[in-house]
Image (tube, grey):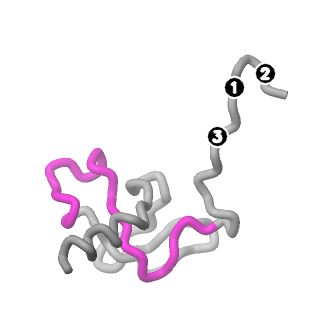
Amino acid sequence: MVLFGRKKKAASVPADGVWAREGMEVTFRAEIMPGKSREERTFRIENVSPSGRVILKDFLGEHREGAFEPINFLREKVLKDQNS
């Protein structure tokens, strides 16, 4: 039953509960790194902790999912197709 017109939000976490994997690239939100291009805000994940925070290669500290832009798996495919 829906009360007061509220709808359930779609889960942002995959069924296995992991939002990131080692070796993936993630991009910090522009608000966190103003004035930097997308390439300058993109880093590769080195390690994912059990809490879901990530450690990045060549960038200090642990970071949570909310610090990054939503992951768009199709972006990589489109970029590959454009460069072919």
Q: Which mark is residue 6?
A: 1
Q: Are marks 2 and 1 in contact (CB under 8 Å)?
A: yes
Query: Residue 26, percent across and down?
Result: 37, 67
Badge 3 is on which residue? 9
Furthest-top residue in view?
4
Q: Residues within 10 Å of mark 2 (few under 14, many from 20)?
A: few
Q: Which residues are magenta?
A: 18-40
30 within the magenta span: yes
Q: Amino acid at mark 3?
A: Lys
Label 3 vs label 2: CA separation? 14 Å
Q: Residues within 10 Å of mark 1 (few under 14, many from 20)?
A: few
> In this image, 69 relative to 30: left or right?
right
As displayed, is residue 71 above or below residue 9?
A: below
Label 1 vs label 3: CA separation? 9 Å
Q: Which mark is residue 3?
A: 2
Callout 3: helix, strand or loop?
A: loop
The quarter holding residue 6 reads top right
